Amino acid sequence: MLEVDMGEKAFDGNAAAELGRILRYWAGNLKHYALEPGDGSEIYDSAYRQVGQWAIVQEQGAS
């Protein structure tokens, strides 16, 4: 699950560029995680404000 709060101003009008930067940074760091349920981290924008989080979650009913 990846959740990013775009806020009311959507990154000062640069939502697409900022979200692209966040996704590239997030994807580049995946190698540091086992990608098992429970893994996750906060997500920060280019101003180092926490704007969301990601987590590996197990689907309901999955074992």
Image (spheres, rainbow, N blue to C red):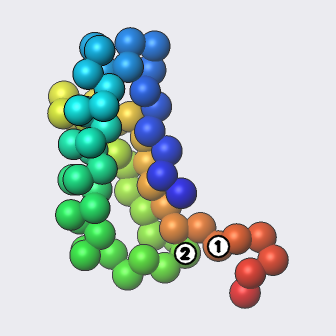
Q: Is residue 34 left or right of residue 31?
A: right
Work out whether 60 lies above or below 3.
below
- Pick whichever of labels 2 and 1 is earlier in the sequence: 2
Say which residue appears at 21% left-offset and 53% top-offset: 25
Which mark identifies residue 45?
none
Q: CA distance from mark 2 to mark 1?
A: 6 Å
Extreme front residue here? 16
- Residue topped by disc 2: 37
Say which residue appears at 59% left-offset and 67% top-offset: 57
Confirm whether residue 44 shows in the render: no
Q: Return the x and y of residue 5 as percentages of the image width and height.
A: 46, 31
The one nearer the camera, 18 or 5, is 18
Work out whether 24 lies above or below 37.
above
**Decide: marks 2, 1 in contact (CB < 8 A)?**
yes
Say which residue appears at 44% left-offset and 39% top-offset: 4
Q: Is residue 17 left or right of residue 4?
A: left
Give, as a three-letter code, the residue at label 1: Gln
Crowd rating for badge 2 (residues with CA inside 10 Å; few <14, some 14–19, many 20+) = few
Q: Return the x and y of residue 28 as percentages of the image width and height.
A: 21, 63
Which mark identifies residue 58?
1
Locate the C terminus by quadrant.
bottom right
Give, as a three-letter code, the residue at label 2: Pro
Work out whether 12 lies above or below 1.
above
Q: Return the x and y of residue 58 as percentages of the image width and height.
A: 64, 73
Crowd rating for badge 1 (residues with CA inside 10 Å; few <14, some 14–19, many 20+) = few
